[in-house]
Structure formats: C-alpha cells, structure tokens
Amino acid sequence: MRKKILSFIVIILAITLVISNGYSQKKLAQTGFQFLSIGQDARASAMGEAFTTVEGVSSALFHNPAGMARLSSFVDVAASQNNWIADIKHNSLSIALNPLQGRYGVFGISAMWVDYGEIQGTMVWENVDGYIDTEVFEPKAIAVGIGYAKYLTDRFAVGGQIKEVAQSLGKSVIPEEGAKKNIASALAFDFGTIYRTGFKSLSFGMSVRNFSEELKFEKEGFQLPLTFKIGVSMDVFDFYMKMPEGHSLLMVMDAVHPRSYPEYINWGAEYLFMDMFALRAGYVSNQDEYGLTYGFGMQKFGLAINYAYTSFGVFDPVQRFTIRFSI
C-alpha cells in the first residue's frame, strides 16, 4: 500500500509539472476574478500563505481541501474579515463537519464575498469632457463551495471542492445600445493531497485551485487564477526530546505556480506556547509591494482568535481577523 501511495504522489506531481508548463506558455496577467487569489484566513496569511500541508481546520478549503481530513472535532467554523487595499473588504466563512470521527470523511462548506465599495459610472458623450456621469454602482464578487476530504490510509489524505464563482461589475451604458449588466459566473474546482511521511511530523502536500472553463463578459475571454502549489511542513521541536508538552514550532514552505504571475515561494512559521498562544511570521518572495507577514493568535476551549498584518508598500497595511470555533 505504501508503494502505491508513493507512486500515486509521484504521478500527481509529474502531471502537475506537465500541466503547469503547458499553461506557462499562455498569456500572463490576463486572468480575471482575482479575488480568488487573495488569502482569507488570518492564521494562513500570517504564515505567508504557506498553508498547503496544515491540517485540521475548515479554512483549509481556501488552500488545500485535503487539510480538512484530520479534523478532530465534530464541527469547525471559521469566519474571517480581510481589510484589503483601496478600502476593498473581503469576508469569508468555512464550516467543516466530521461525522463518526472521519469514518466517512469530512464534509465542508465555504463562502467568500467581496465588497469593492461605490464607483461612479460614466459614459461617452459629445461634450468638452467627452463623457458624462451615470449612476453610482457597487461591484460585487462571491464564491460558494462544497468540499470533501478523507484519509485513505493513516498517512495519505485527499480532498476536493466544487464551487460557484460570480462577479458583477455593474451596468455599462453604451450609446445607441443601451445599458448592459456585466455579470459572469462559472463552476470551479479545487483538489489536493497531503502525505505524512512517518518521519516525525514531516508532511508533503499538493493543491490545484480554481480549475475552470474560460469566461467572458463581452467579447474577450479570460481564465480564472489557476494556481498549483507543492508544500512541505514539519514541527522542528520534534528534534528536541526535552521540549515540554504544548509547545511546537511549525515550519512550512510552499512552491507556487500561478497562471498569471511568475513563480514564487511562500515561507512561514508558527510558534505555539502552552497550546494557547501563537506567534506567526511569513515571507512571500517575488512580490512588488509586500513580502513579510506577521500575526498572532489565542485559543482556548475550542475558541480561537487570529490576527495577521501585512505591510503593503504604497498602500495602507492589510489586516485580517479570523474567529474560529470548534466542538
């Protein structure tokens, strides 16, 4: 069985590399629905979005659905708010259900929605300015998904999610054609795997997110932000036999191949003190306006509160908050 699992992982990684190379030959910076690429969970964001191999939380649906498979509680709920740049607000909710302690797998529901604020509409006009104002509109975006994850053996987990994604860019008024509603939607798929090697807490993982058909608003087609990730993680305190119980130092790394941007690396670390307080830091390479991320969290009696801070260059800092509850 172990040989079969290892062979399966090798095949998946090979397919991932082949597909990613094929996509890398296509146009860059042309994907739409970029809100699907923005990190939602404060814990993951504080760790530089290196979350492919982190397990046991419902928010894994936003990173690698296989991460739900090792959920220890019956239900896990996480709600997040992301104060993004330019006063854009991202909100998300994830719920995971674990009936019969994972015997039949773990089921999950995810949702994220984006408020872009108000924008003044305009249309072409024959005056000095060349345009006139139309109505004020409010662009929106939403994604709702259903996921499932299960450990096929005591070391190998798989997971997937199907989601409906949609974006509304308001009305546009074209002379002699009238008003048009700019709305696009599609089904998208996420899937991934996690493999525990058996060497202490060393784990490997892989995820593919936002796999979908081409979309159109009018004439020009575009793709969703398809993203491939391969990750590794380990608690480095495993090498220190005298560490007191309740302390851990999780080190994580993800190699990321997005469809619309050059490859980059996510690094992250989380120090957990007395199973109650957590300090986190991360780094995202090859970015123009941000790189370092920081955060902290507190958890007790099934309730956790997490915060993440990201300095964003010429923009205001990005702050994320997550409340998680599990029973």
Image (tube, rainbow, N blue to C red):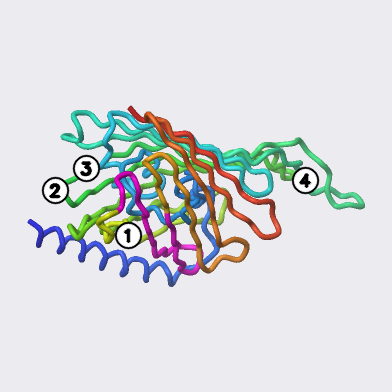
First to last magenta residue range: 243-269
Write down the residue under mark 1: 236
Q: Which residue is mark 3?
A: 150
Question: How far apart are labels 4 and 1 at the CA level?
Answer: 59 Å
Identified by mark 4, the residue type is Met
The front one of 208 and 326 is 326
Select label 4 or label 3 by which is in front: 3
Mark 2, residue position = 153
Task: Work out whether mark 4 precedes mark 3 in sequence or the reverse, and give the earlier one.
Answer: 4
Distance between the alpha carbons at the discs numbered 1 and 2: 24 Å
Question: Given this view, does label 1 or label 2 mark the residue nearer the observer?
Answer: 1
Kindly report which numbered mark, 3 or 1, lies closer to the viewer in this rendering. Answer: 1
Packing grade of label 2 (10 A; few <14, some 14-19, many >=20) is few
Q: Residue furthest left?
A: 1
> Percent x, y for residue 74?
28, 29
Determine which residue is flagged by label 4: 123
